[in-house]
Structures are given as structure tokens and as C-alpha cells.
Amino acid sequence: MQKPKILIARAIPPAALERLAGHFDVEANQADELWSRAEFTERMSGKDGAFTTGGERIDAELLAACPRLRICANMAVGYNNFDVPAMTAAGVLATNAPDVLTETTADMGFALLMATARRISESEAYLRAGLWNKWRYDMFTGTDVHGATLGVLGMGRIGQGVARRGAHGFGMNVIYHNRSRLDAQTEAACKARYVSKEALFREADHVVLVLPYSKEAHHTVGATEIGWMKRTATLVNIGRGGLVDENALADALGEGRLLGAGLDVFEGEPTVNPRLLALKNVVLTPHIASASVPTRLAMANLAADNLIGFFSGAGPKTPLNPDVLNRRA
Ligand code: 8YV
């Protein structure tokens, strides 16, 4: 029997590629070329399945060009690159890669929070530039993390991980806002109190954004929300760049209306708004929140499990539109 044909859109850990090659007729991209939309569509057109990362857009237009396609497995928990309703309509299964990256990503949220509050990047740049010639009482004085109020916007698995770190590790007073309130047991485990969005921005000393991106969530944090924040507060974004109006943020950071920001994701990434690059009080990292060696391997293996499970009949582990499976059954 012919093996299903799959496209692996980007370079992936070799161990995951080896597994996939054992099950499928694989077209890989270990050279990690960035294909144009036309080239990606062309390569996808004869495939039964695809291994995608967060960057490949799967929408009605692409699906129309790929009549054989039955599954796209994303190596990311976020799936704003998928038009899930269009995939469901086309009978194409969508899967993502949740859970395996929760703690690693929460670690990074906390790392950015600390680096921002304690001005780590700015002070390191100063030292490396050879400018450090004496101690001063107010040199790079930042703000405290321990005992401060942590506001988590988006209290899914990763948000809860950030909240637990703050509450249990740093004695923080944790408040959160989410589309729906968590059950009492989960709130207790995170020692977190539910507040309105406005109260979160007004009360928090450190705000961490961990909500998924959708059109409705575009610029969740704009001039109004930033205006609610304390001048001594920090903002961390490990969700998606589009959640924040970067120009409003740059205005506030530049005018001293906010102490600092820690950003792992950007509206036009990998291009970064030059206004952010020019500011000292912002810590910038290139979308690496899930980037530990074991976690990236686990994410790739979960995407591979989804492809292998789907085609073997055992079933995918983390389907986003399981209706597609029921329809096929
Ligand atoms: C990925 C992420 O590394 O999982 C997500 O949603 O943002 C990151 O962990 C990125 O999307 C590339 O796949």
C-alpha cells in the first residue's frame, strides 16, 4: 500500500523527522527555506497531510488547491495560522501541540517579567559597552517582583503556570482576567483572584499576556489599557504580537508612563517595530518562549503523533476540530 504523502513545512528535530519518515512518504524542509505562499501551496497540493509550525497560513484558498489534504498538524499550541472553520468545512483535521510546552513557556514568561522589572537587558548592555566605572545607589534600580501584584490576562494552562510561579515562588498577590472564570479549585491552586479587565490593568504591578490571538483579540492592549496601568508597572507579552498595539506601547515606554515591557512576540515578526528597538526599557526576545531542547522535541513529537495516529486509525491526540473525524467515521 502507498504511504500517505506529507509535507513538513519547516526544519524539525531530526528524531521527529526520522519517526515521520518511517510512516510516510515525506517531503521535508531541513534546509529551513522560507517558501513563498505560491511555493508552499504548490508543495502542499499533492499531499495527504502536513506538519506545520505557527507560520504557515491554512485557509480556504489554500485548501481549495489541496483536494487530497486530510490533516494539518501544528507544532505550536497557538493556531491562529489555521482557519479552523474553513478546515472543518473542507473536511481537514487540525491539530495543535498543547500541554508539552506549558511549563517551559511559563518559565519564559517569568524570566521576561524578572528581566523587565530588574532591567537586566539594559544593564547588561551598559556593562558590555564598557560604561560601568563606579557603583551608584540608584544605578539600574527597578521594581520588585516578590510581594507585588501579578496580573495574568488569559488564564489557560500557561497563564496558570505563570500565576503559580508568582504565587508560590515569589509570594505575589495574583489577579487574573479570562473569558470565563476558573473553577474554585483551580483558582485556589494558583492563589488567583478573578477581576475585571480594567481592574487587572489598574491594580497589577506586572501584567503578563498569555491569551490566544484571534481577530477579536487584536490590540487587546492599546492606549486605553496602557493608560489604566501604573507608571511603575511592567507589561510582558508571551502570547502573540497582535495582542498589543506596539505604537501605543512605544509611546508609553518612551514617555515614562510605564516602567518597562518584556516582549517575546511581535506584530510583524520576525520584523520588529523600530520604535521598540530604539527603547532601552524593553526586553526583546525572538519568539523563544517554548524554546528548550526537550520541549521543542516534545512539541515536534506530539505533532508527529497526531499525523501517525490519524493515518493509522488509532486517532490523533490533540484534535481541534474532532467533528471532522466523526464525519469520516
Ligand atoms: C512556537 C508558540 O514555537 O506554541 C506556540 O503557540 O508560539 C511557540 O511555542 C511557534 O508558534 C512556532 O511554531
Image: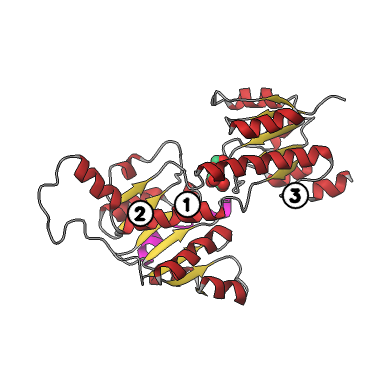
Could you say which is closer to the camera, residue 13 or residue 60?
A: 13
The disc labelled 2 sits on which kind of residue?
A: Ala
Disc 1 crowd, CA 10 A, few/some/many (<14, 14-19, 20+): many
What residue does disc 3 label?
A: 321
**Residue drawn at x 28%, y 64% as measured from the top left:** 143
Tags 2 and 1 in contact by the CB under 8 Å rule? Answer: no
Examine the residues drawn in magenta and state their main secondary structure.
Answer: helix
Going by the image, does 116 lie left or right of 311? left
In reply to whether residue 223 is colored magenta, the answer given is: yes
In reply to whether residue 221 is colored magenta, the answer given is: yes
Sequence-wise, the earlier of marks 3 and 2 is: 2
Is the shortest distance between ligand 1 and the CB of mark 1 under 8 Å? Answer: no
**Residue segment shown in magenta:** 214-228
Image coords of residue 66 (percent x, y): 75, 29
What residue does disc 1 label?
A: 238
The disc labelled 3 sits on which kind of residue?
A: Asn
Sequence-wise, the earlier of marks 3 and 1 is: 1
Q: Secondary structure at mark 2?
A: strand
Disc 2 crowd, CA 10 A, few/some/many (<14, 14-19, 20+): many
Going by the image, does 191 lie left or right of 137? right
Image coords of residue 195 (percent x, y): 50, 74
**Residue drawn at x 84%, y 41% as measured from the top left:** 313
Tags 3 and 1 in contact by the CB under 8 Å rule? Answer: no
**Residue drawn at x 45%, y 71% as measured from the top left:** 174
Tell me the number on the disc at residue 261.
2
The disc labelled 1 sits on which kind of residue?
A: Ile
